Amino acid sequence: MSIISEISGDGDSLLPLSWTAACTGNGVSLPPAKSNYLESVRESTAKFISSAGQTAVSISPDGAKHYVDHFDMAKFEKYVKHINSWTHQLPLVFDSMALELNLIALLDLLQLGSGFRKELHAAAGRGASDTIRFGCISLHISQTALDAKGLQALTLGDVSQHFGIPLFGEERPMVEGSSAVMVSQASLLRPLAEIILGCLHDTGKRLEQGGFSSLADFIIKMCSELPTAAHLVEKLVSAFPSLRDAAEIDGQQVYLFKKAQLIAYDVCQRFGKSDPKFAFPDIGDMTLFADNVVPAMMQHHGLIVPSDAIAAKINAGQELTLAETTAMRAASIAAAQLVVDYANSSESALKPGDIAINQATLDNYWWHEGKDPELRVLQRLVCKNTIYF
């Protein structure tokens, strides 16, 4: 027995409703023309947290100073170096630089599903990030076409097979007491598979409509126009709804752009030393890649303080609303800037190391730190209805 997904679309591209609903940033106005999208993230999050978002989550300047004054530079550098090396350590063979770039970009495009972490561990024994990595490596090894046309040709069954996401739950008899006819309900992870499929289909469609053969082709051409992270982030966000990570809360636009920044960062880390068009001079201007882990780590360190209501939901592992997750993620970016500013100021006694302390490197550090055994038990943010983290 099969279940046909509900779909929405214009006839040319039918997309799962799960994906459409998860693209919550689609109706949000983008920054004005000629804006620096990295600065738009920094400015909009700071403005939100100092006004409408202040009642949901507060940031602690004193907490930032205390954190920096007790900063473990050796641990920071060790963890950041480990994270920065992942793009060089994929256990795969590529026939060209473009194919490698394409897979790295695809891995970052699909950094989603964190809200299904509990269900993924129960079904497959791995979390969201490892599920996406597993699936993308499987697609590459099977020589599945991952260009614009290939992304549109993938099916829900392909996603289930490659990413190890079950589409159906346990079978039960249609008639109680009789096993003659058994039926299966959709699994709790089916919406995640649909979100992944929608992301792949829509990205492939938009690449083809724009005259690009692949995601790598898009990135190469955008970076050939202007080799900066801000330019690439702007073009990615403008072109693909799956990267339009923004929200409008109480009339305020809040820009986060997590995955677009992550693509730019990883492209620079992997190819910046070998190709000048990927050696972005503004890589240090990026903000946190705010997801479910980093805000939880910052709460743990006393850098952000959620309201009692939000803290109770986080501690209970309950799903947060869009407004609540936006507030937590925005606060993490605003608080990280306090850490960066103080760590690099003359007031701080912290001695500079080999790796600069900026929002991107702090993100790498806190994300890796969140995997430490004693910190894995911390509750993370839970939000299923999002394609952005």
Image (spheres, rainbow, N blue to C red):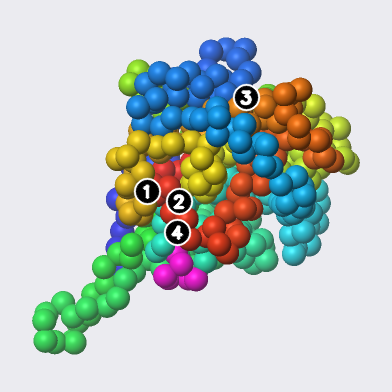
Q: Is label 3 in a helix, a strand or a loop?
A: helix
The residue that appears at 36% across and 31% down in the rendered structure is 56
- On the image, numbered disc 2 is attached to which residue? 380
Prevailing SS of the magenta stretch = helix
Residue, disc 4: 117
Please provide the residue range marked out in magenta: 120-125
Q: Residues within 10 Å of mark 3 (few under 14, many from 20)?
A: many
Is disc 2 in contact with disc 4, using a CB cutoff of under 8 Å?
yes
Q: Which residue is mark 3?
A: 38
What's under tag 2, amino acid-wise? Arg
Residue at left offset 76%, top offset 35%: 350
**N-terminal-most mark, 2 or 4:** 4
**Which marked residue is nearer to the observer: mark 3 or mark 2?**
2
Q: Is residue 51 at all visible to an observer of this figure?
A: yes
Camera-nearest label, 1 or 4: 1
Of labels 2 and 4, the one closer to you: 2
As measured in the structure, the alpha-carbon distance from the residue carrying label 2 to the one carrying label 4 is 9 Å
Sooner in the amino-acid sequence: mark 1 or mark 4:
4
**Amino acid identity at mark 3:** Leu
Question: Spatial distance from mark 2 to mark 1, Cα to Cα?
Answer: 7 Å
In the displayed orientation, state which residue is furthest to the left: 176
Q: At label 1, which amino acid type do we have?
A: Ile
Query: What kind of element bears circle 4?
Result: helix
Front tag of 3 and 1: 1
Which residue is denoted by mark 1 in the rendering? 314
Q: Is residue 282 magenta?
A: no
